[in-house]
Amino acid sequence: MATNTTPITPKLVDKTGKSHIIEIMNVNKSFGDLHVLKDITFYIRNNEFVTLLGPSGCGKSTTLRILAGFETADSGLVEFEGADLLSVPAHKRHINTVFQRYALFPHLNVFDNIAFGLYLKKRPADEVKKRVEEALETVGLSGYEKRYVDQLSGGQMQRVAIARAIINRPRVLLLDEPLGALDLKMRKEMQIELKDMQRELGITFVYVTHDQEEALTMSDTIIVMKDGVIQQIGTPTDIYNEPKNAYVADFIGESNIIPGTMNKDFEVTFRGKSFECVDPRFPEAVPGEEEAVDVVIRPEDIYVKSEGPDYVNGTVTSIVFKGVHYEIRVEDDTQMEWMIHDVDPVKEGQRIGMTFDPDDIHIMRKSCFSPDCQKTNSDADDSGVSEESIEG
Ligand code: ADP
Ligand code: MG
């Protein structure tokens, strides 16, 4: 297998020119009649924190298991530093996995749990001791060598599992919902720590979660999946601010998704009003012809005013205090419901106008996930995401 000093020309186009440790090309996987991965293509850059994000059953774990070598692909290519990975047996890959269930040995202490892989390799005792100590320090558990697994909290068990996974110095660490069993406070702490660990170790992390907040907090790159199809790949800010379709916009946070039309650059019409925006028309738009689009506006990006001719006007239907902001629901005069987050309260039944900065009006292509799409979303294989629009 090539080493990281060999320059490898990436097969998949990447405008940053950074090197790719893994490239996955047109991978398909079915279990019986169930087509679980549908022509999955993406790359993982060296030393990146990449997150596969999507609802339960969308194929995240299957993707990881193919990378780990626990599962085969039906078709497609997977390369590790430019060389075929699929023919390499799991134990020979420079890849290790951390699972949600820690799978620690209850009859062994922390030291022996972590050292297990080195014992199998018959490493000398002083080397084992040194490497276990290093791994424990990395995960913040120095001094816990003699503890037994049942004397540890969930968070500590997960740290031991991570220490065990990094002891063999893998190039890539796969983490499948590793914080899923922890309570919210511990999960938040571990999110920050895992990100720090990844930087400190200088290795690539491929992380799986269904929790969009977790993905936004930790990742350099997020890959949003639904029903075995990649919906969008981008940085957390790309994905949050420039969702490629209504599915991503909705999954990644609360949004108002509004059917709209454009017939010129930098102007969009919805709910009977026209607004300035920062997006030109899509390249495929026919000049002079009106084009249907989806508009996404985040609840925190709406200004509440007194009603007026230039605003989307409506009536407040509910207001709930959420600690920092109020969650305000408004029915506009065309009977569409809006969600607003605002630090200033309004009254139920109050008439208001809503307006927006051009910057905060995001234009998306119509897709089968659009609010006014005729197809049901479960029919939706064709997400309206084209090849070139996947990259953020
Ligand atoms: P995720 O990790 O995103 O929740 P998975 O990759 O585990 O999703 O599963 C995707 C789909 O494939 C699910 O419908 C799941 O039931 C199915 N599946 C996964 N593994 C198997 C298997 N070994 N046999 C049959 N079906 C499977
Ligand atoms: Mg899973």
Image: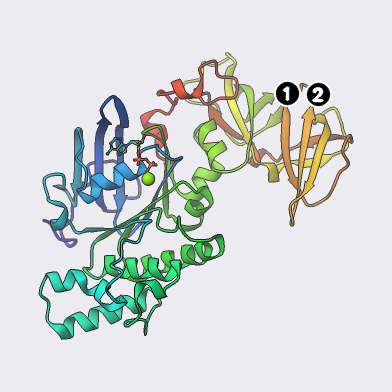
The quarter of the picture where the N terminus appears is bottom left
Q: What SS does tag 2 mark?
A: loop
* Quadrant in which ligand 2 is drawn: top left
Tell me if mark 2 has few (under 14), some (14-19) or many (20+) residues whose alpha carbon lies within 10 angstroms of its own: few
Q: Are marks 1 and 2 in contact (CB under 8 Å)?
A: yes
Q: Which mark is residue 333?
A: 2
Task: Report the front residue among 151 and 208.
Answer: 151
Q: Could you say where residue 265 lies in the image, as x and y percent from the top left? A: 59, 27
181 relative to 65 in the view: left or right = right
What residue do we see at 29% from left, 47% from top? 64
Q: Could you say where residue 111 lies in the image, as x and y percent from the top left? A: 28, 78
In this rendering, is residue 50 above or below 189? Answer: above
Tell me if mark 1 has few (under 14), some (14-19) or many (20+) residues whose alpha carbon lies within 10 angstroms of its own: some
Residue 290 quadrant? top right
Q: Pointer 1: what residue?
A: 271
Q: Which mark is residue 320?
A: none
In this rendering, is residue 271 above or below 145? Answer: above
Q: Amino acid at mark 2?
A: Asp
